[in-house]
Amino acid sequence: VEASIPEPQREAWKRNQITSFTDKDGFEKEVVRHVETTLARSMFNCDEIAAYSATSLAFRDRLITHWNRTQQRQTYRDTKRVYYLSLEFLMGRALDNAMLNVGLKNVAQDGLAELGFRIEDVVKQEHDAALGNGGLGRLAACFLDSLATLNFPAWGYGLRYRYGIFKQEIIDGYQVEVPDYWLDFNPWEFPRHDVTVDIQFFGQVNKKTVGGKTISVWEAGEIVQAVAYDVPIPGYDTPTTNNLRLWSSKASGGEFDFQKFNSGDYESSVADQQRAETISAVLYPNDNLERGKELRLKQQYFWVAASLYDIVRRFKKSRRSWNEFPDQVAIQLNDTHPTLAIVELQRILVDIEGLEWDNAWEIVTSTFGYTNHTVLPEALEKWPVGLVQHLLPRHLQIIYDINLFFLQSVEKAFPDDRDMLRRVSIIEESQPKMVRMAFLAIVGSHKVNGVAELHSDLIKTTIFKDFVEIYGPDKFTNVTNGITPRRWLHQANPRLSELIASKCGGNDFLKDLTLLNQLEKHVEDKQFRKEWAEIKYANKVRLAKHIKDTTGVVVNPASLFDVQVKRIHEYKRQQLNIFGVIHRYLSLKAMTPDQRKKQLPRVSIFGGKAAPGYWMAKQIIHLINSVGAVVNKDEDIGDLLKVIFLEDYNVSKAEMICPASDISEHISTAGTEASGTSNMKFVLNGGLIIGTCDGANIEITREIGESNIFLFGNLSEDVEDLRHAHTYGSHTIDSDLDKVFNEIEKGTFGTPHDFSAMIAAVRQHGDYYLVSDDFHSYIETHQLVDEAYRNQDEWIAKCITSVSRMGFFTSDRCINEYAEEIWNVEPLAVDRHSIWGP
Ligand code: H53
């Protein structure tokens, strides 16, 4: 690296190298400097927000010097890089994570205390970076943490939405959406006004002959500028600080079109600007649902084109031949949202760089990997051919050519199966015709993976079956999801993390999670169990306080806390949970006071957002709140049952909720939840789970043992037959569930009409999600939970044993699997003692 700077200058740069603070005094100096200069305030006018801002700036300065060195090192070594393309990065808060990852939280805590602040209060000032909906976006964030921690040269590419996922308010029991304007003050991003890309839309394609060769030229109808914003991603206990580059849209040619402006057309000039800015204005708030909106397609192309331009520009600096592109670049498609990248790279190589089609296609397919995250039909992306034609005329031509060559090869290999061509065509011959993005992603990638074993098997036998025949099974693989133990244990549950460290030989388990297995030999240790239980209790007290503060309901932390927090969706079956709660309520009501005294007190806690246009999900939220309103004030019941809906579930709330659960619910209809990742978070924090044989629940069971999990319900292989029977046979509803429905219809929980569609979905419309089929097993299993919880000693032993066997579910393991099986990349060794500092 050094040799790239001429001798005389090098000395001056070295002499003046920035040195980051390492102790309390150094930290305090930086905070005061930022308060007084960057924020232009004085110590007499320093509130918690200012303390947060200054602390963040102090850590940001530190990260960015590490960032610079990491980028310099990666450029100099010029090894293969990974690019993770995701429309969502659900990062949550950055400060606490940054302090812990660089190992200076204690320093900051002491420094802030001397300056008059409690670090917990300071950390809470930060607004979540909520650029995602749910599991898919949070997975991307965990992967960034692991990529940096493992020292992989890796970049994330996404969109810098002005509005992240909406804030949820509950008013009269209903969800109300409030915009999430989060960019007021964001010290974690660096605008790069010098890194811009012009992105074209609309227009037409013309043929031109250049040097005897006919090429296609796409004349743009509209140009929008992409501006880069960089977010540093610190690894844990390593100087590696990677980059997350988010693109923001702007009218091209600066603030206004001056020509229009000067000719008096002020309004239209402003309108152009606003139209351009609309592209990155807002995150689409749907999880596992695609609605085919033109602006969404514009977002996808805008982001993909800017990212590829950037990647290609970086590659070209190394002056290698194009055939080396896949040796230098691996691009992972997080779901089908970035699939246009395949088409865009083919366009760059053929139309702009002049490569032959076949040569270009070989490069393209060797570069991309595609991760599928769902089998739900409503979540699989399809775009109307007419829309693609209008917005991206050249891309549609390329898609048709890709499809043509693909279908030709299929026809050759399967000459007797005419229907095969219709089934696998990238273009669905429907009215209107549609581009099937998942098929395009498969054809344009060298590897396709699912996110848990069952899910990866299912895609091979259902939605992608034909492609397994065409390409053979090796193109399809599994990488079971994981979570970063840094955020989800060390940061979210510091006391448990510390207790674990005391039994596992220090903090190394945070980098090698399999070291948790050392806990198992302490399971019988009475004192250890006691401390474990105390920590759980303290975490429950904290959550109880939050519940009191936000809902006014007082819950007893000695109750069993039963938690279901995730996006509200029929397939995730919050309706099953609330019907079960009603069943419990009715059972308690039917008891004598003496019988009631023997019951175990329980708090049912729900949280999660419904997509604004998902009416049924909103009804489910309303039912939960309506049940809570009745149960929580019923004096017969008291502490025996409380029903809570926590407003605005997000990453920072998850960090408080996961450590406080006794049992959490992962109860999707078998075969519908691709993986789930909160199941891992809850178990890692010493909670048990009740769940179906679905997604990663199955592998969690295999790892922690069947006796440490509460499984119930039908299996995925039986779902199809059951659904068929509902529609074509006689469909009888479980009798206990029927009683629950009757009670709702009596008006016990408010106007019955409000909930009639939820009941009809089960009784009249075929019970697609098998709520009735699984109800009995669900109720019975909850009784087993109650019994097990009564024996606290054994319960704690189960929790400890489970945690000790969770090593597999770290996202570090995922990233190593991707690196080896899909990306073929290696970590970059870090020289901590280089003259340039780490
Ligand atoms: O992705 C998670 C899985 C989870 C799955 C989720 C997901 C989304 O959040 C959005 C769209 C989509 O296709 C899938 O539902 O099961 O754990 C990460 O893989």
Image (cartoon, helix red, strand yellow):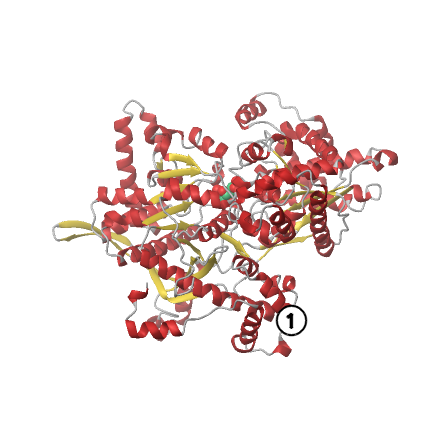
Outermost residue on the top side: it is: 729
User: Quick one: 144 or 764, which is closer to the camera?
Assistant: 144
Q: Residues within 10 Å of mark 1 (few under 14, many from 20)?
A: few
The number of callouts visible is 1
User: Quick one: 411 or 186, which is closer to the camera?
Assistant: 186
**Location of the N terminus (image quadrant):** bottom left
Locate residue 6, reporting x and y percent. 28, 71
Residue 382 shows in the view: no
In the rendered image, the vertical position of residue 315 relative to residue 108, given as above or below? above
In the rendered image, the vertical position of residue 744 relative to residue 609, given as above or below? above
Residue at mark 1: C-beta within 8 A of ligand 1: no
Outermost residue on the left side: it is: 212
User: Quick one: 196 or 694, which is closer to the camera?
Assistant: 694
User: Which image quadrant is residue 103 in?
Assistant: bottom right
Locate residue 631, reporting x and y percent. 77, 43
Q: Secondary structure at mark 1?
A: helix
In the rendered structure, the answer to whether residue 171 lies left or right of residue 145 reads right
Residue indicated by mark 1: 114
Q: Identify the amino acid type marked 1.
A: Glu
Locate residue 549, reporting x and y percent. 72, 56
In the rendered structure, the answer to whether residue 682 lies left or right of residue 720 reads right
User: Quick one: 523 or 606, which is closer to the camera?
Assistant: 523
Q: Residue at x 48, y 36 (%)?
A: 375
